[in-house]
Image (tube, helix red, strand yellow):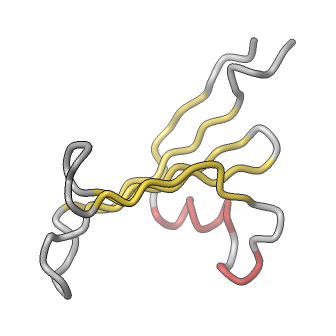
Amino acid sequence: MTVTNLRTLTCDERNEYLGPIDDRKDWGIESSLTDLGGRFGEPKVLTVWYKNNIRIRDIRWPSPFEFEADVKPCEHHYWEGSEYDED
């Protein structure tokens, strides 16, 4: 089993990994959650991008009010490896 390497990314680092939005053909979306009503905790939009055994997780904390800024800064995390990988 591969040990997972998780670290926080800045927005710029995240954009370097994923590249321009119109050129992400090598990346797929592994999972996503849009919970604007806060049914599963604080309102959030969560997306996990994947390519090979690399994952990039994005979390946005939107305002409950339309057209208002997010209530917290976005978060981005990088991790490599998976519980499904075998050495």
Where does the image place residue 72, in percent across and percent down from the top left?
Answer: 20, 61
Of the 4 image quadrants, the one containing the C terminus is top right
Residue at position x 80%, y 21% from top? Answer: 85
Where does the image place residue 22, in percent across and percent down from the top left?
Answer: 71, 83
Where does the image place residue 52, in percent across and percent down from the top left?
Answer: 82, 44
The answer to which quarter of the image holds residue 21 is bottom right
Which residue is at the far right?
Answer: 87
Residue at position x 75%, y 21% from top? Answer: 84
Nearest to the observer: residue 12 or residue 72: 72
The answer to which quarter of the image holds residue 10 is bottom left
**7 w.r.t. 86: above or below:** below
56 relative to 76 in the view: left or right: right
Where does the image place residue 67, in percent across and percent down from the top left?
Answer: 20, 88
Which residue is at the far left?
Answer: 65
Of the 4 image quadrants, the one containing the N terminus is top right
35 relative to 43 in the view: left or right: right
87 relative to 80 in the view: left or right: right
**77 w.r.t. 13: above or below:** above
- Total count of labels: 0
Residue at position x 68%, y 34% from top? Answer: 80
41 relative to 59 in the view: left or right: left
**42 w.r.t. 62: above or below:** above
